[in-house]
Amino acid sequence: MELVILSGGAAAGVVRGIQAEFEKNSSCTINATFNAVGQMRNQLLAGDACDLIILTKQLIDQLIASGHVIAGSQQSLGSVKTGVAIKSGKAAPAISTREELLQALLSSKGIYFPDPEKATAGIHVMSVLKALGLDKTHSDKFRTYPNGAVAMAAMAASDEDNLIGSTQVTEINITPGCELVGLLPKEFELATDYTLGICTNAKNPELAKQLASILTGAASVEIRKRIGFEF
């Protein structure tokens, strides 16, 4: 038996953290795809198989309204803030104010972040870069990737030094080779509620309900807190 999940990258650490035990206890295989929330929504709307989907609360609400997610099945995993990252072991820049963040970005050789059109964090980071005027002056530094985890992995693997990245803190915390410097300054803060829902066309809805209760319940609290969820 297979349980199919489409999920925003911010929840990858939670799903992977409980996957082995769940598969063992339920005698099933989890087939999970993690990418920008907009991409995951589009795949569901295009007819991709899915039992359980994890996106932003806003997108789940829209999918309930459109009939793609069962009303009443939605449950929150918690909220995730957007952070700033560097390669592990490098000197951390000051980023607590608008001016400090701007200087850190200006001093960097590359700015890594997720898809500015489909990823929650990518859309937000691009809005921050625009607010700082960097889209007009330093867009050559922008390094965009399908999702935050891929962006952070690319930054970690780069031969260049003095790089900076920004995405959801959970994606930073689960990516080897990069580390969280801190959250974006208060004026640019973004906290996103990640919510799951059971898909209307789920092939294994009861199994999906079991997994949903683990992902949002006491069994995963420690994992969620460790990687950066707040609730």
Image: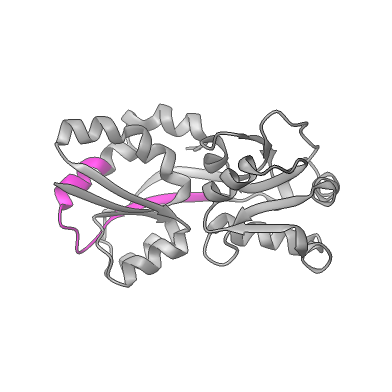
Residue located 59% across and 45% down the image: 152
The magenta stretch spans which residues? 192-211
| Residue 80 picture location, percent across and down | 53, 44
Q: Quadrant of residue 30?
A: top left
The type of colouring in the image is one colour
Describe residue 144's horizontal placement relative to residue 222 as left or right.
Answer: right
Residue 101: give x, y in percent of width and height.
79, 47
Whether residue 213 is situated above or below residue 50 in the rendered picture: above
- Give left or right: position of 180 versus 211: right
Q: Observer-nearest residue: 47 or 73?
A: 47
**In the image: residue 99, left or right of residue 200:** right
Q: Nearer the viewer, residue 194 or 85?
A: 85
Q: Which percent across, then down, holds residue 231? A: 47, 37
- In depth, the one of 7 and 197 nearer the eye is 7
Please tell me whether residue 47 belongs to the stretch shown in magenta. no
Q: Position of residue 1 (x, y in %)?
A: 13, 46
